[in-house]
Image (cartoon, rainbow, N blue to C red):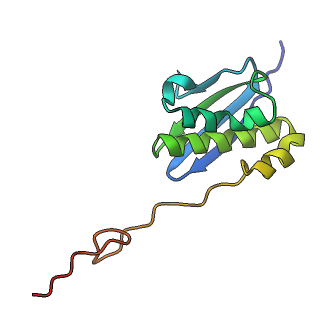
Amino acid sequence: MEKITKHLAVGRRKEAVARVQLFAGKGRIIVNKLPFDKYFKRDTDKIIVRQPLQITNNLTKYDIIANIKGGGLSGQAGALRLGIARALTLAEPQTRDLLRKQGFLTRDPRMKERKKYGQKGARKRFQWTKR
């Protein structure tokens, strides 16, 4: 029996967390038990998810199964991109420099700013009245 090598990685963006499994295959991407074309409706999200695979010329070399929780669809796409890039570096360490140069291995630190007390939101104030 042949042993299947599976590479596990985690990607995060905003509130989204993507757990990625990468293994040899035909280029299928499955997100939360759905084909990723059905899960991500927007073309921009589909492009973002495929970027690390396109740059390393691995679109048809690996199958990807991902579980994503939290956040919105665009944050989930960013989290999945980071997870795929990290898994690719585990599978093929020589791609690390290329992915790093493109910025796919850097976690985007931008998060939602918390609401402040005595205010309506993070920056918005209640309306000031003179009388």
Q: Residue at x 62, y 56 (%)?
A: 108
User: Can residue 35 be seen in the rendering of this structure?
Assistant: no
- Looking at the image, is 25 positioned above or below residue 96? above
Horizontal arrangement in the rendering, residue 77 relative to residue 70 (left or right):
right
Q: Position of residue 8 (x, y in %)?
A: 71, 37
86 vs 53: above or below: below
Q: Quadrant of the N terminus?
A: top right
Whether residue 79 is visible, yes or no, is yes
Q: Position of residue 131 (x, y in %)?
A: 9, 87
> In this orientation, which residue lies closer to the viewer: 37 or 23?
37
At 50% from the left edge and 23% from the top edge, which residue is drawn?
A: 38
Query: Horizontally, is 38 left or right of 30 in the view?
Result: left
The residue lying toward the viewer, choosing from 31 and 19, is: 31
> Residue 114 placed where, x, y %?
41, 67
Does residue 31 sit above or below 76 in this rendering?
Answer: above
Picture coordinates of residue 73, whole percent (x, y):
48, 40
Q: Quadrant of residue 89?
A: top right
